[in-house]
Image (cartoon, coloured by chain):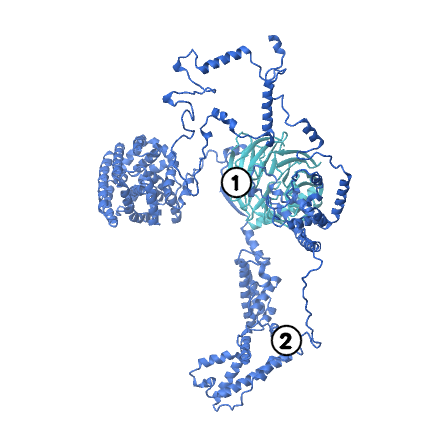
Chain colours: A cyan, B blue
Amino acid sequence: MGLSHQNHDDGERERERERERERGMSVSDLPRKEANVLKGHEGAVLAARFNADGNYCLSCGKDRTIRLWNPHRGIHIKAYKSHAREVRDVHVTPDNSKLCSCGGDRQIFYWDVSTGLVIRKFRGHEGEVNAVKFNEYASVIVSAGYDQSLRAWDCRSHSTEPIQIIDTFSDAAMSVCLTKTEIIGGCVDGTVRTFDIRIGREISENLGQPVNCISISNDGNCILAGCLDSTLRLLDRTCGELLQEYKGHTCKSYKMDCCLTNTDAHVTGGSEDGSIFFWDLVDATVVSKFQAHASVVSSVSYHPKDNCMITSSVDGTIRVWKT
Amino acid sequence: MESDEVDFVFYGTPIEREEDFTSRRKKAVAEASGNLRALPPWKQEVTDEEGRRRFHGAFTGGFSAGYYNTVGSKEGWAPKSFTSSRKIRAEVKQQSILNFLDEDEKAELEGQFLGTSSQFDTFGFTAAELARKQAEKEQEKRPSAIPGPAPDEIVLPATESIGVTLLLKMGWRHGHSIKVSRADSRYDARREARKAFLAFSCDDAKNQFGSLGSSIEQPVHDDVHSSQSPPAFVLNPKQDLHGLGYDPFKHAPEFRERKRLRMSGYKEPGYRKALSIKDSLFGFKSGKVAPGFGIGALEEYDAEDEDVYASVYDFEETDVQEDEEPLRLGKDSKQKLIGKEQGVLPGFRVASNSDNHLERFEPPVIPKDFVPRHIFLGPLETDNKLSVPPPPEVPPPEDNNLKILIEGVATLVVRCGKLYEDLSREKNQLNPLFDFLNGGNGHDYYVRKLWEERQKRSDQTKLALDGKLSKNVQKMTAESRGKLLGERPLDRTLRDSSSSVTSADVHLQFNLSDTFTTPSATELSAVAKPFKDDPAKQERFEQFLKEKYQGGLRSTDSSGASNMSEAARARERLDFEAAAEAIQKGKLGKQSELSAQQFLEFSAAGGMQFTSSVLEEAKDTQSEKLMVKNMFPKREEFEWRPSPLLCKRFDIIDPYLGKPPPAPRMRSKIDSLIFMPDTGNTAKVEESVVKDLKSDVHKISKEEGNNDIIAEVEVEHVERPVDLYKAIFSDDSDDEVEGSNLKKVEDPEKKIDVASTTLNRLIAGDFLESLGKELGLEVPPELPYSTNKFKTPGPQKETASIDAGNASILPVGNNSSSTCDAVSGTPKSQAKLHHLDVSQVGYLEKNELIDTGLPSSSQYLETGSSENKDVKVKSEKMPQEARKAKSPSSRRRHWSSSSLSEDESRKLSRRHEYRSDSYSDSSNDNQDRYHSRSRARKKGSSREKRRNSRHSKHRKHRTMDSPTQSSRYGTEKERSDSKGERRRYRN
């Protein structure tokens, strides 16, 4: 087992290098130059997300608004106001027609992007909702709440009742990721639980540390889990092995994001001191680190195709980084 | 005219035509006077202006009044009991005449009440109203172009004259005197001068204006002041953190000035920073505002809204605050000084010459030859030598042995102190050899020897000291020397030093010898460094060694380890001790290197043992990390059922398609009930549970139509909802199916009690499940009722056959129902009794559960492991024991409740009859027989009860039980037959 893993690891490393060479991906290509600063949020920005094609980005924050930006031109396009409390997460459908957002008001809002009106509100979480995601077909919203549950909401019907409540978590669910067939949730109880709809199984990976944020690698084989012991952990999804740990940053008390770059060559994440870290995926060495914000970096989002990244911070700004 | 009308625009309500108006009035008048011809007089009604019936005739209440023609109110005149407790005071209702008046009567009274006059009308509403009314009145009087009253909306009377309005527009305000403002230039000049003056010295300004301190900031007030107008109230913005209306300077107005000065002082350049911080407090990112940000006014602010990010700003703030604090203090003191110079208190002035002179004395003259350093005259030892006269020279005693002994003792005494002498004297009191200690033979020689030895010793030490410390011996104090030598400070003896210097000295020596236990141990650490790779730990280890061999008091927190956790320290200490031991050993064996390796191993092992690492001990943490790595991530897999809709939405085929839905767990409520502390309120809980169960049981009850009849009949007797009875009865019949015979043996009197049986069974099912788990049996999940019913008979029989020899094993039904009786007799007594039971027999409570649940439980056990009979028997024996203990008492209780009153017993017997009727269809003969028997027994029992005292009851019951039981066994087969019949019937 160990040997095979080693081989596997080596193989992967080799592949990774190969890929890197192919794409000419090097440290110099990392987005480290500040291209734009998006100002407009009053108070902390809690999340910033690219849309599916990376032309726009959405942010949400403590000022109870969701804002739509063009990060490349630095233009504020629209503000979506209806939340009663801070907005913690936002996600947009692949066709850019709908938004979903969640926050401290325990509701999930389902928005129409162009009109800026709320189509539906999903109530049911018994606590704040930490994260929200559309599925591939934008037919289901899955939300992760402080009430130790994941809830799936139907966008197709007019029902405001959850389709399913997953309450096997033993602490607040912090983050949720969806694949075509799976729902993956990260929880403060230290588990990353994968709910495979296809086979009807729940696979729980216990990391032993509160999981703050999870994100899936672009090839879909790994989960990057940001833990509250200031460590990012990379898990193999098939066997549940811990592939690598990324350290150096500070993440002890805030909900912060981490993600992989679009080439899966590097891992990036913010720190509580306002700096951004880039780690090599394989070696786990800090390849780049720079001060980006004045305060806690709440969210990072990497462009799906280009070398571009947006970061949001408690200091109220969203910054766009390019090479 | 008609066509013209179309063109008009009407405003307001049209004036009625004369004819219409008159006709209506006529009619009204006619109605009012009652001379309407249409109706006969007895049908005519008197109404008030609102059309309410006014008069009802003498017998129906007279005039309409009060509340629906009664003298009551909405609340009515219902008698109320007056209650007033200390906490809830009775409300004293003040009645006034208005409570008893109609609206019209009130309207009549209106003129007598007070209203707000326009003079004091703040909002002008009443005034406007009044004016309008006035205008209306006037309108009526004088002729005008517009016929009728003018529309209110158009004509609004002025409340203020045109003059007032003009003045107001010119800048005049209410309450001001009218004069040319700022007419004289002298005033302006004076004001300017004053301003300039103020700018130079605030204090003078204050003196000049007295209380008008704020005039500096708001010079406009000066105008007000000068124009002799009534005081204008200026609203000062609240800038402090005191409560509203709180004035910290209420009784000390002097300090207000000081405070103001200080605040104005802030505006000086040195305080710019502080001020800016203050300002920034109200800025957006201050962190003091942020928490409330994002929350609506109507939402309460709770823990969720805490600004977790605020701490970032807090840090900054506190830092600055710290900077600011000393500055302010400095300024404060400066202010104080200034205040002293210029006079702080208004009306006071610093006196030019004060009577209060401090008398100063010259310092004492220091002699010219004084050297500011103390010089010791000489070492104490020499003093001792001088002060103690040498005892006379005495020849040694003849006995050589004695001489040697004396000399030995003397040296020892000198070395070890006087205590040794005392000790040996005490010890050897009877020994003639030691007479010399008590002034006997050889005492003189001993004294002499002692002196000599002492002399010798002191010389030695002196020599040693002299040799070691060259010149500055004299400057050394005892303490410093002690420090040099690594002694611990000695606790001084309280003895007078002058009287027995020698003894004190000896004592000192003695203590010293104690102090130096094992010197030169410190060298060991130099030899072996077991924690070379961790300098911090090595350091701590050395410290540990030093402490260990020094023998001094150990400091509670050894230097480096103060930041370690208790566990880590303890572990390290263990390591150290082991290492030290090994070092010692290694030293002995001259194999220090080897042993050092041993320690390493040991410490590593220690690290492995303790998982919670705290410090940066490289080895330990590494090993722990390894462990953690091995432990995490841990993968577990569970079954998870995605809902069909979710699958559909994800465009995935439901993996559980076509499979039965998961068995619903119907014990959500009961779960919580079981673990509730069992107290008197169980009864209530049971009831509620029964209601919950109602619906389930209702289904069952439908299957058995005959039971409904019973239920309906039952309602007559006890005032409880029908459904409850249905529930109870259907369940009861369940029991009956399981063991109709058993059921019939005891009194079937209280059918309601069976409700508690269901509960008990449910509880027992849970309990059994847990019990089964404990016993290592596989307990099948709780089954729905119907299956339960069908399965029961077989195992039941089996248990019976197994325990046929045991007479007391089977009264399952009997017991269950009897306990139920006990549990739920009459609603009130039930709780109490149950409680009593609980308190009486602690563990019996549990067994009771088994007891009652045995029909199902035995089945579980049976199905779970038929080969595992010994276990099963054991589990059955337990309830049996419990039963032995329990049944008599429960029976007794039951009786006591049954024989409470004649009435009740009668009722019970009636119920009995109903029951027998209903049962007749299934097992007629059995029923009757048992029924009659049980009745007889019941009678007997009640008699028994009356006769017997409480103590003798137990025995009696048992004797009574046995025949019925045996008879039951006899009819075992019969019963099963009937059951089979029943089953068939139902199917």
Q: Position of residue B561 (x, y in %)?
A: 58, 61
Residue B799 in sight in this render: yes
Image position of B506 with respect to A177: above or below: below
Q: Which mark is residue B476?
A: 2
The residue that label 1 is drawn on is A149
Q: Position of residue B134 (x, y in %)?
A: 59, 23
- Mark 2 is on which residue type? Met
Question: Quarter holding the N terminus of chain B?
Answer: top right
Q: Position of residue B706 (x, y in %)?
A: 30, 30
Q: Which mark is residue A266?
A: none
Mark 2 surroundings within 10 Å by alpha-carbon count, few (fewer than 14), some (14 through 19), many (20 or more): few
- Label 2 resides on the chain identified as B
Asked which secondary structure carries label 2, the reply is loop
Q: State the residue in front, B617 or B777.
A: B617
Give the residue drawn at x 44%, y 28%.
Answer: B100
Q: CA distance from mark 1 to mark 2?
A: 77 Å
